[in-house]
Amino acid sequence: MTFHSGAAMGALLAVSGAVLVFLTGQGTLGGAFAGLVVSLLIVAGFGVAGFVPLAVFVLGSGLLTRIGARRKERAGAAEPNQGRRDQRHVAAKLALPALAGALAVLGGGSTPTLALILTASLAAAFADTAATEAGPLTGGHAYGVHGTRLVSLPHGAPGGMSPGGFVAAAAAAILLSAGAWLAGLAGSPFEASVAAGAGFIACVLESLFAATSLGTRVGHFGRNVLLTVASALLALSARALGWVAS
């Protein structure tokens, strides 16, 4: 078992982040505690570098939830419980990043590969949140695919995504991956770009999947798990093809 040299500083940041999330109402007590566990696993495996993209996701998601909250409530597209995430939200979107951190501690894989998994899965999670939260604020309609037809859907409907949501998803994935590169988690700008692209594509695929009968049965939290897994697999495929250095 090997802890990253920056784990102590990362742990301090993780505790501070969990307290901030709870005090600012971004998460319930259970959600803040679950987030703390995830943060500690990530910083144990990757140090402060791993905490940076996680912080971008958590704080960015909280900010996006609060921007235009009343307008989203009137449109019926606001998050329930005033956007306070609980442990189910944390588990759905952060289980894979937590697993990557745990494997890094246990020596269960190549650190660069696990770092790519972490970055890509967080990029997808942030892209999905950005599309959901920013889409209703950009005006226009949301659209989804039903069968072979493109149909107009209300904002917040499963499978619906607006043009503004697409832009927000892409921007969020790029921002998070850039943060991972600047922190030294992603090995190069191109690797960060691969993670961002994987996150954006996974977000679009999740939207298409949500409109299917199977997507409905899997449910919101199940689709969020699949979202992060799909993004990681896309990024790993790029590495397997030699597009990203091992």
Image (cartoon, rainbow, N blue to C red):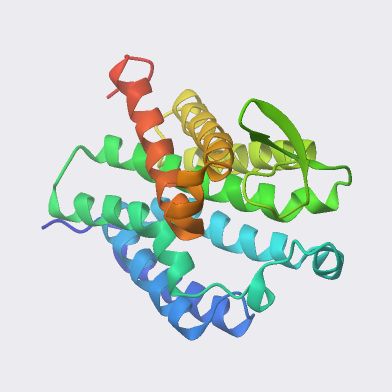
| Residue 165, placed above or below residue 49 | above
Q: Nearer the viewer, residue 192 or 98?
A: 98
| Label total for image | 0
Q: Quadrant of the N terminus?
A: bottom left
| Residue 18, placed above or below residue 223 | below
Is residue 33 at least partly visible in the picture?
yes
Q: Nearer the viewer, residue 230 or 53?
A: 230
Q: Nearer the viewer, residue 8 or 98?
A: 98
Q: Along the horizontal axis of the image, is 29 left or right of 60? A: left
| Residue 89, placed above or below residue 162 | below
Q: Position of residue 239 (x, y in %)?
A: 33, 22
Q: Nearer the viewer, residue 137 or 98?
A: 137
Q: Position of residue 167 (x, y in %)?
A: 73, 36
Residue ID at (50%, 36%): 202
Residue ID at (41%, 37%): 230
Q: Position of residue 172 (x, y in %)?
A: 63, 44
Q: Residue furthest left?
A: 1
| Residue 164, placed above or below residue 87 | above
Q: Quadrant of the C terminus?
A: top left
Quarter of the figure with residue 169: top right
Q: Along the horizontal axis of the image, is 226 left or right of 2? A: right
Residue ID at (39%, 30%): 235
Quarter of the figure with residue 94: bottom left
Is residue 12 at least partly visible in the picture?
no
Q: Position of residue 49 (x, y in %)?
A: 41, 50
